[in-house]
Image (cartoon, grey):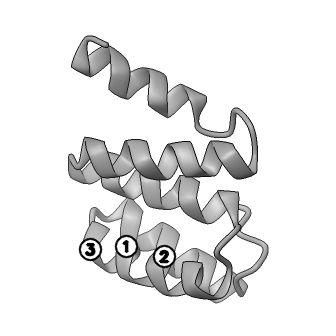
Amino acid sequence: LPLLALSQFEVKKIAAFIYYGEYDSALFYLQEALKKNPNDAELYFTKGKALYLKGNLNGAINNFRTANNFKPHIADLFLARIYSKQGD
C-alpha cells in the first residue's frame, strides 16, 4: 500500500486491519485520511478494496471509480471482478 500521504505507522495499521478482516476499523482510518487527502487515488483504491472484502460491492464500485478518476486504471482489475460477479 504505497499511501505516501500517510505515515508508515498509519499505512501499516490500515493494512493490518484489512489483513485481519477488521474492515470497519480500516474504513474508519481511511475515511479520516481522505479528509486530509481528498484527491488520493491510493486511499480510494484501498477503501474500495476494504469495502469489496467486506461485501459492500456498491461502495467498492464507487471508490474504485473515484480512484480511477484520479489515477486511470488503478482499480480496473477489482472493477472487472465485481462486474463479473454481478454479471454486468
Q: Quadrant of residue 35?
A: bottom right
- Up the image or down, 86 lies above or below 4; here it is above
Given the image, on which type of amino acid does mark 3 rest? Asp
The residue under label 2 is 30
Label 3: which secondary element: helix
**Res. 27 mark:** 1
Q: Position of residue 72 (x, y in %)?
A: 74, 37
Q: Secondary structure at mark 2?
A: helix
Disc 1 element: helix
User: Residue at coordinates 57% horizontally, 51% vertically from top-left?
Assistant: 66
Q: Which mark, residue 64?
A: none
Query: Does the residue at mark 1 contact the one at mark 3 (Cβ under 8 Å)?
Result: yes
How far from the left and from the top, in percent, is residue 76? 58, 29
Q: Is residue 10 left or right of residue 85?
A: right
**Residue that mark 3 sits on:** 24
Binning the other alpha carbons within 10 Å of mark 3 as few (below 14), some (14 to 19) or many (20 upward) gives some
Q: What is the x, y in percent for residue 70?
A: 73, 52
